[in-house]
Image: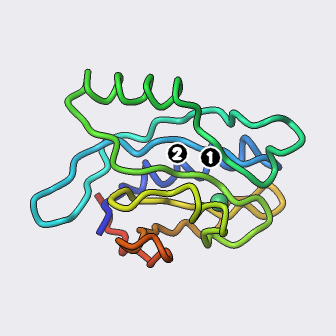
Amino acid sequence: MLSLSDEQAAAIRAHGEADYPYECCGLLLGAFDADGRKTTREVFPISNAREESAKRNRFLITPQELMRGERYARSQGLDVIGFYHSHPDHPAVPSSYDLDHALPVYSYVIVSVTQGKAGDLLAWEMEADRSRFNPEPLAKG
Ligand SMILES: [Zn+2]
């Protein structure tokens, strides 16, 4: 279970629309709660690091950007609890590329952006054996 406020979801949608037709990406900062729930406190936008030509289909956060995000999170007393990115003109469902580049534990939020307009926003978490993603319930934070 991932909690995300309307305001945070709106920020992710706006980022997806701003970066369309490219994928946007960013970090979810917050806390891992004792009951397995994750609470988002802040979304941390990161620019897409890929080459222009490949930007459309792949998102990548560089180690430097991740470190910057983690440093900022720590300064706020938060953890990196997940990642978000957009799927321009594709459903908000993880691709096989996403599966290959994900890690268990974290939440993966995907927003579908169709012709520049954000639509479905879904959360996913990885099966512990990394074989697939499962839908993760979203709660309003
Ligand atoms: Zn993706």
The Cα–Cα distance between marks 2 and 1, rounded to whole angstroms, is 5 Å
Vertical arrangement, residue 128 with respect to residue 115, above or below: below
- Position of 37 with respect to 47 (left or right) is left
Q: How many marks?
A: 2
Name the disc covering residue 140, or none. none
Query: What is the quadrant of residue 28 in the picture?
Result: top left
Outermost residue on the left side: it is 34
Outermost residue on the front side: it is 129
**Residue drawn where x is 43% and y is 57% of the image:** 103
Quadrant of ligand 1: it is bottom right
- Image position, residue 105 (x, y; %): 32, 59
What amino acid is at disc 2? Answer: Ala
Q: Which residue is mark 2?
A: 11
Query: What is the quadrant of residue 42 in the picture?
Result: top left
Instruction: Please tell me how crowded label 1 is: few (under 14), some (14-19), or many (20+) other residues with Cα within 10 Å.
Output: some
- Image position, residue 68 (x, y; %): 44, 22
* Disc 2 element: helix
Give the quadrant of the N terminus: bottom left
Vertical arrangement, residue 92 with respect to residue 51, above or below: below
Question: In the rendered structure, are the residues bearing label 2 and label 1 in contact, judged by CB atoms less than 8 Å apart?
Answer: yes
Q: Which residue is mark 1?
A: 14
- Image position, residue 30 (x, y; %): 28, 44
